Amino acid sequence: MTESSANKLLNGDACHRTASGRKSSSNGFVKSHCLFQQSHKHRRPREKNQNVTHNSSLYKKPFRESFEETPLLVAVLTYMGYGILLTIFGYLRDFLRHWNIEKCFVARERDEQKDFVPLYQDFENFYTRNLYMRIRDNWNRPICSVPGAKMDLVERVSHDYNWTFEHTGKVVKDVINMGSYNYLGFAENVGACAEAALESTQKYGAGVGSTRYEMGNLDIHEELEQLVARFLGVESSMAFGMGFATNSMNIPALTGKGCLILSDELNHASLVLGARLSGSTIRVFKHNNMQSLEKLLRDAIVHGQPRTHRPWKKILIVVEGIYSMEGSIVRLPEVIALKKRYKAYLYLDEAHSIGALGPNGRGVVDYFGLDPKDVDIMMGTFTKSFGAAGGYIGGKKELIDYLRSHSHSALYATSMSPPVAQQIITSMKIIMGEDGTTLGADRLRQLSENTTYFRRKLRDMGFIIYGNDDSPVVPMMLYMPAKIGAFGREMLQRNIGTVVVGFPATPIIESRARFCVSAAHTREMLDTALEAISDVGDLLQLKYSRRELPLASLGWMGEESLLQD
């Protein structure tokens, strides 16, 4: 692949994720952006819509996302909570630790290094000592079963306020799993996938012990890549053993100095790292905001590179299919339209959307009914919908051939484990219906039904829910720091396993619980989880929503009725 053909792709300088990135609302505390929509007279109170869709003709069906405005009182109380917990008690406890009145477990400089620049003393370390450790018991819980629709947890206790844990020897049985990315339910130890993986282990062993370019290229790897290309509808594809490295090690192979990367502000850390490692100039646009993206594209074309004003060697737009902390879906039709208009290239990360979206489970491209050829680099992982590990990149043959000889992941990483590759092959064939059954189609339909049901019930209960109506990632806002740990603990007492998320994974005042809906969840499981969520919501007063009951369908709105930014 020549340098000019390689120039069909990416770049970075310093990627800064803003605290909220999006335009704040009138009270100054809220992010609010979304969708497609309703005329002014039908606007629901306490819910604003930014990122307006200007060309409804690009969409074949309504595109609905909601990010309800944070109530002003809740925002104020959240800031006060962090102020009291962090500022007042945090510095008080650090004072007690300094004088050895309270025992300090955290890493810190030795006395003989007191004249050195502090290695550990920064805000995140201060946050870890005084807030994270208080709620650390909500994370890293040991699982001792298949992480399917239900799971078993190892019980543990802490006698030093979560600095260390001890296992009690007991097991918490049949915990409903609302946290794993098991979208299609392939995380299982029985069935066709497990049997095929077992046979593969007996034939090839568990590991390869070499890179693809040496002695680690097996026929099963070739079969996997051909199947992935056929599944995506592209010319060729390449598989990697780690999803994170698929982004972080391949973006530097595609862009470099003199290139420009336009990155969504909420892109995953692997995309941010890859962009930084590439040495390209990075500019960040507001999340899913096409006006912000188009402005950056126009400026890039008009002004070119800094100082020299030469044209950029290439401009790469980097977006995700489903954003895992927001539950939002990329506005792909509009992104593709902008990319074509300004002659840029598009890198699409479908880690959460592949297998989970679209009538055929082929991701966000399938969801919008678009041509895969309009996406220059299609990236995804096998860790979610396929119940395996690793990632892939798909696209034109010349792109894949170039990556085979230039990607660090291809040249230096050990080949994918054969049973993992077989798990992917079997699950992908089931999704495609090539196993001779309707199991794949049934799971896709079940996931869609579960997602719609779960989101609707949570909204009706009065919780603030973020994201797209069709996204199986369902963030539920908690806001206040004390409620992060309380929610996780109360849910586990009711035998529901959940994921609670706070800073630095989210802006500091936008803590949330994140549910991941699976096709393996039965209606009874969802109802049990919803009942527990409602009980805990009443207990902790989490039902912040001020939305009215759902309005009757307003039908398709024309461009003249779209809300203005």
Image (cartoon, grey):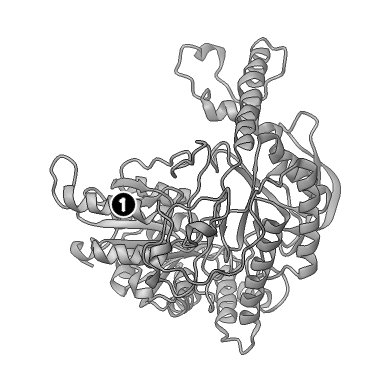
Mark count: 1
Secondary structure at numbered mark 1: strand
In the image, residue 317 lies at what x, y percent?
Answer: 33, 57
- Name the residue located 37 percent from the left edge and 64 percent from the top edge: 334
Q: Vertically, is 257 above or below 198?
A: above
Residue 519, image quadrant? bottom right
> Where is residue 100 drawn, in percent x and y?
69, 12
Figure quadrant of the N terminus? bottom left
Nearest the viewer among 409 and 85 is 85
Amino acid type of the residue tagged 1 in the rendering: Ile
Q: Residue at x 49, y 41 (%)?
A: 25
Q: Is residue 213 at all visible to an observer of this figure? A: no
Label 1 crowd (10 A; few <14 / some 14-19 / many >=20): many
| Image height of 370 relative to 246, above or below | below
- Compared across the picture, whether 101 is left or right of 291 comes to right
Q: Which percent across, then down, holds residue 488? A: 73, 45
On screen, 20 above or below 435? Answer: above
Residue 160 % position (x, y)? 77, 28
Q: Is residue 150 above or below residue 265?
A: below
Considering every residue shown, the one lying at the far bottom of the view is 436
> Residue 469, located in which quarter of the rendered image?
bottom right
Residue 44, quarter of picture: bottom right
Q: Residue furthest front?
A: 41
| Residue identifier under label 1 | 261
On the rendered structure, is 400 left or right of 367? Answer: left
Left or right: 440, with 212 as reference point: right
